Image (tube, grey):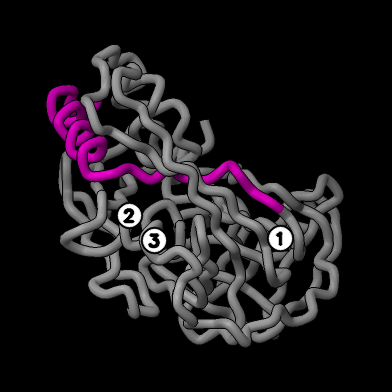
Amino acid sequence: MALVAMLTACGGGNSDNPSSTSNTALTPSGSPDTSAADTAAANPSFFDGIFLDGTGAGYYQFAANYADAFYPTATGQVRIYVTADANTNFSTTPTAILGPYVASNQGLYLTAEGLFISSGPESSGLGGARIFQQLPQGYQWGPNGISAPLYEITLTAEDVAGQRVSYVAGRDEAGGNGLTVLLGSDTTPMPAGAQTYRQTAKVLVSHVSFNTASRVKVFTTLEQTQAYYGGTVQTLGGYRYLLTSNQQAYAEYNGAVYFAAVHNVGDVDDAMPSGYNKIAADFLVQEELKTGLPH
């Protein structure tokens, strides 16, 4: 079971095999048009109807902490929101569900401009994300400090009322958030009004992504990794990464090696963490509390 879901992947558990939609050498990205950045949404009611604090339906993701084991040691829920329609950054509020959950993961994005860091559940990046533009059914975003958005996110709201909890949890691509482990056998129907948000991400700038939960434990340098897996060490934005012969990527950062994913302009990723409205999120919290942590 992959315990890291790259947003790319970009994932938040403790895993040695994150998924990605593209593991090929980076192609020249060019610079997307950012002249419309920070402009009003074409359909602000869609964005505000989900994310606006106090009036939106709510947007929540689930996460978990691991200690070198299959089962989580703690689980949490993270609310992602804006306090005003004009906000250009998401705010997040993490809450522990089971155990002493700590929202400590960081998503790292290596581009031609350099390395940018963003925090968020399952490395969704939204904790430190700049909203470049609202769109009729989503938004464009990138980590703070970057000059152009990395991703264009399309959100699809789905009514899951009456569906089994296990089915809803099983469709969440964030393998490391603990939902499948804790609720994979839960046949309780979801309540009226419960919705999930399916994400699809289109890559706007070529980059390499990884996160602080995906450190490789058996290798400490790219040369060691290359000696075992083969491939070519490449440089991007002043940092090194390895693209192996089997198309797996590894990034070097602060004296450690991390599993990584390579994203080219135009790639589309639908294997992303699910979002939940407040009704669905609150219900899943109740189900986690009834189940408890595995022993």
23 on left or right of 174: right
Q: Are marks 3 and 1 in contact (CB under 8 Å)?
A: no
Q: Nearest to the eye among marks 3 and 1: give it.
A: 3
How far apart marks 3 and 1 lie (CA) works out to 26 Å
Residue nearest the viewer, comparing 278 with 261: 278
Which element is circle 2 on? helix
- Residue at image position (56%, 51%) is 6
- Residue at image position (29%, 69%) is 82
Q: Amino acid at mark 3?
A: Phe
Residue carrying label 1: 263
Q: Amino acid at mark 1?
A: His
109 on left or right of 50: right
Give how far across and how far down residue 133 sits, in percent.
51, 74
Q: Earlier in the sequence, mark 3 or mark 1?
A: 3
- Residue at image position (33%, 78%) is 87
Which element is circle 1 on? strand
Residue carrying label 3: 47
Q: Are marks 3 and 2 in contact (CB under 8 Å)?
A: yes
| Neighbour tally class for label 1: few under 14, some 14-19, many 20 plus, Cα within 10 Å | many
**Magenta stretch, residue numbers:** 268-295
